Amino acid sequence: MDYDQARYSRDDQYEPLLAEKNATRVEIDEEDSPLPDELTRDAVELPDLSEPELARHYTRLSQMNWGVESGPYPLGSCTMKYNPSFTEDVAADPNAAVHPDRSARSVQGSLELLYDLQDYLARIGGMDAVTLQPPAGAAGEFAGILVAKAYHEANGNDRSEVVIPASAHGTNFASAAMAGYDVVELPSDEDGRVDVDALEAALSEDTAALMLTNPNTVGLFERDIVDIAEMVHDVGGLLYYDGANLNALLGRGRPGDMGFDIMHYNVHKTFATPHGGGGPGAGPVGVVEELAPYLPSPRVRERGGNYELFDPEESIGKVHGYQGNWLVLVKAYAYIARLGDEGLADSSAKAVLNANYLASQLDYEVPYEPFHHEFAATAGDRDAADVAKRMLDYGVHPPTTKWPEFVPEAMLTEPTEVENRDSLDDLAHAFNAAMADSDEELANAPSKTTARRIDQVSAAREPRLSWRALDADGE
Amino acid sequence: MTRGSPYAPHTDAETAAMLDAVGADDEESLFDIPEDVRFDGEFGIEARGERELRTELSDTFARNRRLTEFLGRGHHGHYVPSLVDDISRRSEFLTSYTQYQPEITQGFLQVLFEYQSMLVELTGLPVANCSMYDAATALAEAARLSNRVRRVSGTRVLVPETLHAGKRSVLDNYVSGTALTVETYPMDDGNVDVDALAERVDQNTSMVYAENPTVRGAIEERLSEIGDIADDANTLFCLGTDIVALGLLEEPASVGADVVVGEADALGMPTSYGMGLGLFATREEFLRQVPGRLVGAGEDAGGRRAYTLTLQTREQHIRKERATSNICTNQAWVALRTAMHVASLGPDGLVDLAKRCVTDAESLAAELSDLNGVQAPVHDRHHFREFVAHTDQPAEAIASDLEKEGFAVHVVGEHELQVCVTDLNASKTDELVAAFEEVL
Ligand SMILES: Cc1ncc(COP(=O)(O)O)c(C=O)c1O
């Protein structure tokens, strides 16, 4: 695929900043202020542009950006699916734009949707009870670990450790630490799976939980999951499922059936809500019956045909000021309902087929098999980050690079089900062509994107984080 | 109805050819899931067509009663210009993700850089991140920051007794894994009881949190004194506010705020059942302790200014359990919408909108107070957007009668209602007053 990204530039910058186009300082005078002078600021200085100018500014910026609708976006672990357009329209329904402090009786429609989504997610994960409150996967992890902590405390068990495989996502470690736990890092087995002996050694009466994702970060199913669950439960610990990789399992395996006690769903991954340039997402948490009393409050239930909010008896309280990312939840509901059983199962089938097909077309070693919806190719003696930069010149977004760390020069690739064979072939071409290019070509890449290679090290050395900082720098 | 996912484009022939290429007999054989944990059942979720679903959900949401909301207390709706809806939906923005490859995502990075820049202008503080989930988690992250910075050694976090229950609960959870404890200080006629606060703040205090406007809508009159009290005790002063209030009320930096948190989505988003955008700004001194993503300006190989995520060694994907926060996916697209709304207003528009928040609240309070059985505002203060009204009759009954008349207000005490007016409902205040008359 031949490709050049839009590039608006002027002298030593691309599209000028809003404030560089025009900014005005408006003084706040006591005469025409409704407040006494000492309660107001002196002035406000902001960009001052007309609507046509703004429309053009933001349209240009959008053209200098890459989304799933621009082309393949195979970021491993991120599940960059197509985001169905109609879900935006559904979420924009003015009747759904209500304030969170409305009485339950006046928002029965919204509560019904939340209730049904709780139910859908419980079925999909094989869980007994679900909260929709956490606003992202990491927030779900934090909520889930707090649930585990509350459960242990209620049972008179002060446990101090959470066990996490070395290959896990950074949020797992950070979430466990935020909840006050010591993190015990579990080395990976040589095939990237949990090393059962190492796990045996790591587990103890101090273990509050083991956090796992399945398939793991290189797409391998934890075949020993039943034994692992038993080991964790034997020491009185709980098993936590990181739902980032659920797109591999829909209709073929449910965390609840594997012995997981707590899980989060990553709806911006599995259920196709748009990633929005970094968010918002949603990270609902499902638990087994025994843990339901500890879930965040409020949850939604049905009583005699009416929906109401209630606080679970032993609730941990809240992880979001209100009920989480409402608009995202609406889109997730719409997506799940659009697909139904067969569509969901087909998503996983095609996601796994696409990953396998793509890997089969690559001139790269893929050290860990059999993978599912994603795989870690290795760039071998090339620098994975350089190869990725070169891939940009072939009209695709590259995979996640250099993660997980146990794979040398990893290129963690997750094409998702939305690519057809032709676009997978384009993607394979980008992988292979970049690998065949010379070191010099790699070092000079990218050249077809808006910006050339960006020097991240010097940007971090002297951080300039606002147009004020640029001004001060004489720019 | 199609079988399978309408968003997986494979024809049968294509699927067969791909299976052939990987040497598999069928799709199922690609799954390496042991029998004992294989799920062969059904979820029982019936697929619907797009048109069907739009009808279904529009019927569902029609079961929400159409009330005119005079609601606020931390979640505020203002009119959002069409430009924001229109352009924020462009798929290059909406369907992209975190800018791990900055060369191909300059557009979004620049938007986030501009968002940060606007917050820097409005708060007067030099560092703003490009989003927390909401005001509650932003406050909680501020408390955690106070526990990490060297300047502060204490463990007590002081918050107003009136702190919103949702914020309080989130804060309690976020500090539960630290040595921090949360305590309240009293309020005095809707403002901080500064003397009582001064008595409570000591060297063992990690952070003092105050709000402007307060959750009950009052404008805080002695912010600088609160800043001084915190400063004298080597304690962080965290100020909670919102993006519209920043357009008129005292500049946080000028009253000594070390961290500014709050809701930024009062601009850019419709009322969304509490979905938020946590703003977070702080001093240069704490740069390396900031939670969440930061966009910085750098240079590309062609010598042009370019933007990139920066100082990532603070973050979970590098620092793991020692990261400043666990946040990864954030509210970037909401930040985009908020920045677009701020840009649409411009400085005059923002200042005017903020002034109306004062005058509209003032006149509605006066009108309500003219009614028998209502005194408003309860606090002898200036107000921003909202105020508390005392009702002679039980507030709960009045609110429920008002709801029957088509209006929603907050019940905040046995005889206290809270009423919030913005540009969305300002044209309905006469009707609200009439409804009050009806139900009193
Ligand atoms: C494996 C894994 N776990 C957890 C997360 C965290 O989820 P979120 O970004 O929604 O907070 C991610 C992704 O970002 C992930 O890939």
Image (cartoon, coloured by chain):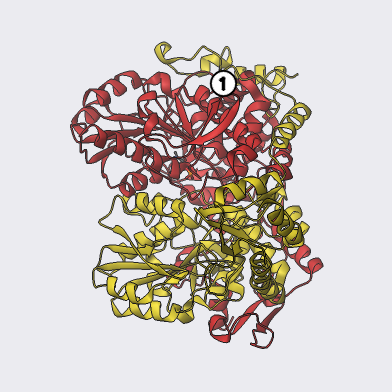
State the residue in front, B68 or B284. Answer: B68
State the residue in front, B390 or B164. Answer: B390
Q: Colour of chain B?
A: yellow
Element at badge 1? helix
Q: Amino acid at mark 1?
A: Val
Location of residue A33 with respect to A128 vertically, above or below? below
Chain of the residue that carries numbered disc 1 in the rendered image: B
- Locate residue A193, reporting x and y percent: 35, 29
State the residue in front, B402 or A471. Answer: B402
Give the quadrant of residue B277: bottom right
**Residue under the image location 69 percent in, 24 percent down:** B10
In-image side of A390 versus A96 (left or right): left
For label 1, the residue is B22
**Residue under the image location 56 percent in, 69 percent down:** B119
Q: Quadrant of the N terminus of chain A?
A: top right
Which lettered chain is shown in red?
A
Location of residue A135 with respect to A310 vertically, above or below? below
